[in-house]
Image: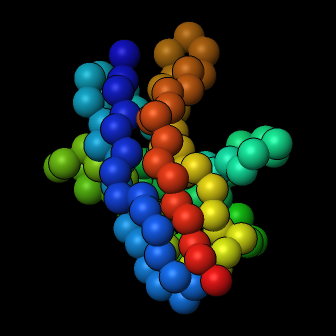
Amino acid sequence: QVQLVESGGGLVQAGGSLRLACAASGSVFSIGPMGWYRQTPGNEREVIAVIFNDDTTKYADSVKGRFTISRDNAKNTVYLQMNSLKPEDTAVYFCNCKVVRTAVFDYWGQGTQVTVSS
């Protein structure tokens, strides 16, 4: 089992920055890729950034060049640095990790609200 706890959300003006953090605990040795997703009311959860165990990263086009995902393995924490925020970035942000055993298991954090005012 893996537990994920997010922090760092809040209210920011357009053009501002926020950094989200996601701390993992439990069977952290089994964690594979970690990522950040976001969801707005009435919409599906969308992946916006992923970091793999070799530190390769991938981003959704909507955040490329503005957001940066990173991980600190010593702290079992993954970060999302969000710069040049736009009102359309307003959403609940979720941390995710994947654990591969006999199948791929997804673990989720509780979500943190990010609100960008215009």
Residue 116 horizontal/vertical position (percent): 57, 72
In the rendered image, the quadrant that contains the C terminus is: bottom right
Q: Position of residue 37 (x, y in %)?
A: 61, 49
Along the viewing direction, whichever of 9 and 117 lies nearer the viewer = 117
- Residue 48 falls in image quadrant: bottom right
Looking at the rendered structure, the number of numbered marks drawn on it comes to 0
What residue appears at the point 52 percent right and 82 percent down from the top-left corner?
Answer: 13
The image shows residue 114, relative to residue 26, as above or below, that is below
Q: Residue, x 29% and y 43% (percent of image)?
A: 23
Colour pattern of the rendering: rainbow
The answer to whether residue 84 of the structure is visible from this angle is no
- Residue in view at x 59 percent, y 77 percent: 117
* Residue 62, position as x, y percentages in the image: 73, 72
Answer above or below: position of 7 versus 108: below
Give the x, y percent position of residue 54. 43, 54
Q: Residue furthest top?
A: 102
Image quadrant occupied by the N terminus = top left
Task: Say whether residue 32 is visible.
Answer: yes
